[in-house]
Image (cartoon, rainbow, N blue to C red):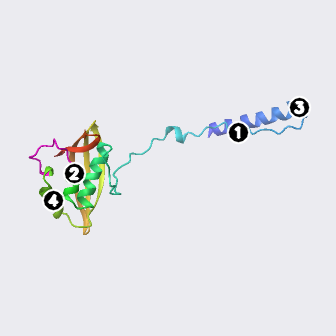
């Protein structure tokens, strides 16, 4: 409030000085710049993005993108083959996500129409924590936390490992 008072006082003083000391020419006065700068923009930080519930299709241009693509293949496309196409050829063969039949079996346990939210946090380059929240057609679902490692192979990102976090 005090700052606003000072700004109004300065504006009035400037107007009075200009009125009594200015010349009598027919010039158009330009408005004075605002004496009070907005403070909320400078001090407000954006809120964390939070989970993405749009079920994005993802892509293979980044680690986050390939994670989103894998989950989209699993939940929306309901295709073990599409999810498997996003797995690194160097992923351990003992991991369940490296076998199409295992992915299809997992997909079969999820009700059709299940939606999900992704919250992906970068731990370090190529390593992410995923919190995935399922919402089944019959109500609230389950939340999973995973540590996912991605790698770049031939210019595209792939899933290298998935572990419980």
Mark pair 3, 1: CA separation? 24 Å
- At 32% across and 49% down in the image, what residue appears? 59
Determine crowd level at label 1: few under 14, some 14-19, many 20+ residues with C-alpha closer than 10 A: some
Mark pair 3, 2: CA separation? 79 Å
Name the mark nearer the viewer: 3 or 2.
Answer: 2
Name the mark nearer the viewer: 4 or 3.
Answer: 4
Location of residue 88 with respect to 143 vertically, above or below: above
The residue pinned by badge 3 equals: 23
- The image quadrant where one finds the C terminus is top left
> Which SS class for mark 1?
helix
Q: Do the numbered discs 1 and 4 sit on residues whose CB atoms are within 8 Å? A: no
Mark pair 4, 3: CA separation? 84 Å
Mark pair 2, 4: CA separation? 16 Å
Toward the viewer: 162 or 85? 85
Q: Earlier in the sequence, mark 4 or mark 3?
A: 3
The numbered mark at residue 85 is: 2
Q: Do the numbered discs 2 and 1 sit on residues whose CB atoms are within 8 Å? A: no
Determine crowd level at label 3: few under 14, some 14-19, many 20+ residues with C-alpha closer than 10 A: few
Residue 110 appears at what percent x and percent y? 19, 63
Quarter of the image holding residue 37? top right
> Which SS class for mark 4?
helix
Mark pair 2, 1: CA separation? 66 Å
Residue 96 appears at what percent x and percent y? 12, 51
Secondary structure predominantly adopted by residues drawn in magenta: loop
The residue pinned by badge 1 equals: 8
Q: Earlier in the sequence, mark 2 or mark 4?
A: 2
Residue 77 appears at what percent x and percent y? 26, 61
Locate residue 85 relative to residue 121 in the image: left or right: left
Locate residue 5 relative to residue 133 in the image: left or right: right
> Which SS class for mark 3?
loop
Please state the extent of the stretch shown in magenta in the rendering. Answer: 87-96
The residue pinned by badge 4 equals: 106
């Amino acid at each position: 409030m005090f700052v606003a008072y000072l700004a109004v006082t300065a504006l009035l003083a400037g107007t009075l000085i200009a009125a009594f000391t200015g010349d009598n020419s027919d010039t158009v006065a330009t408005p004075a710049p605002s004496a009070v700068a907005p403070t909320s923009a400078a001090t407000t930080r954006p809120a964390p993005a939070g989970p993405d519930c749009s079920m994005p299709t993802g892509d293979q241009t980044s680690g986050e993108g390939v994670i989103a693509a894998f989950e989209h293949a699993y939940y929306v496309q309901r295709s073990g083959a599409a999810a498997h196409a996003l797995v690194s050829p160097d992923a351990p063969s003992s991991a369940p996500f490296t076998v199409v039949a295992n992915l299809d079996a997992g997909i079969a346990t999820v009700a059709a129409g299940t939606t999900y939210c992704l919250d992906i946090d970068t731990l370090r380059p190529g390593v992410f924590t995923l919190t995935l929240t399922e919402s089944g057609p019959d109500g609230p679902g389950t939340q999973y936390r995973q540590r996912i490692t991605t790698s770049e192979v031939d210019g595209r990102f792939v899933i290298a490992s998935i572990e419980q976090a």
